[in-house]
Image: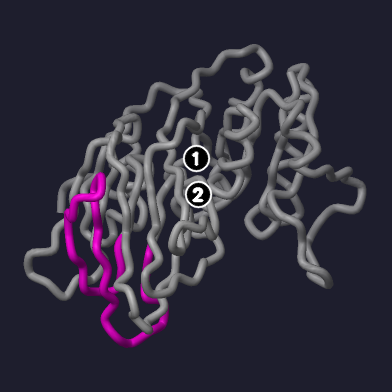
Amino acid sequence: MKIILSANPYRDRGLRATLEAQKILNKAGAQVVICLPFTPKKGERLELPGQVALSSLEKELPKADLLVCFGGDGTILHAARDATLHGVPVMGVNMGSMGFMAELERGELSQLAVLPKGQYTTEKRMMLDVRVLRGEKVICEDLALNDAVISKGSMARVAEMEVLADNVQAASIMGDGVIVATPTGSTAYSMSAGGPIVEPTSKCIIVTPVCAHQLAARAMVLSHERVVTVRLPKGGRKHLYLSVDGGKAVRLTGGDRVEIQQSRYCTELVMLSNRSFYQVINQKLGGFAP
């Protein structure tokens, strides 16, 4: 079995946890390669051990059986798109503060030894296809495991946008923006903005207004079969921004449309325990009680 260890060097200083995991997996009979989840910027100084051979995800994913990420939820989200396109299951080791999507904590690395024996299960998570249209031209396309966020950025004025479900108006929003999330993303930004918590294996699309200037504005849970369109007013001079899974923002102009629908791709997350979603909620978020 070939396993990629992808470490965020800002979280896993000196790749100490990654190198420990490499020893455990090698001893268990796995072929292990180490990759960084991103290409360091020119001149950027990272705390990396000199004797470690690093490869690239682009090179290793087509031949991999599993991808283990070391970092926070952002590291997992960053890797999920490419891993999913190559049909590679993903597992997270939490090196951050929350790590809601991670299966293991830093002190549980010994559990990795069961991976080469195939003693694990996978859980499929719904993803969203996101594309921006300017007229009939597709400006950009992306794949989301958590959410697509359309926001006003640092603009002081109120943003306006229309939300449609299958080309029928579902809401008209005035405020800071709107979040279109998967069930996996329901416990991220959407929850902080007042959206519902949804079991991550569910199939639905969650639309949550952000800081709406309307008493009637509410989060909505739509069928996974719907095509959600967020449309900017034509002729509007205000620029909004689209960010998919917390990635680089795309600038939107008046009349642009963001179309979001269930993807044919699903992220497979590796599970080693039988922890209930509600146990994770209680552990990570302090439970449902006030």
Whether 156 is among the magenta residues is yes
Whether 155 is among the magenta residues is yes
Query: Is 89 displayed left or right of 232 in the figure?
Result: right
Q: Are marks 2 and 1 in contact (CB under 8 Å)?
A: yes
The residue at which mark 1 appears reads as: 102
User: What percent of the width, then of the height, locates residue 265?
Assistant: 50, 32
User: What percent of the width, then of the height, locates residue 235?
Assistant: 34, 79
Magenta stretch, main secondary structure class: strand
Q: Residue at x 28, y 60 (%)?
A: 192
Residue type, numbered disc 1: Ala
| Residue 111 or residue 268, whichever sits in front | 268
The residue at which mark 2 appears reads as: 73
Real-space CA distance between mark 2 and mark 1, rounded to the nearest whole angstrom: 7 Å
Mark 1 element type: loop
Q: Residues within 10 Å of mark 2 (few under 14, many from 20)?
A: many
| Segment tinted magenta in the rendering | 150-178
Q: Residue at x 30, y 32 (%)?
A: 203
Q: Quadrant of the N terminus?
A: top right
User: What percent of the width, then of the height, locates residue 139?
Assistant: 54, 60
Residue 212's place in the image compared with 287, above or below, is: below
Query: Is 178 displayed left or right of 240 in the figure?
Result: left
Residue farthest to the bottom, as pictured: 156
- Residue 256's quadrant in the figure? bottom left
Residue farthest to the left, as pictured: 215
Residue type, numbered disc 2: Asp
Mark 2 element type: helix
Disc marking residue 49: none
Q: Residue at x 44, y 27 (%)?
A: 124
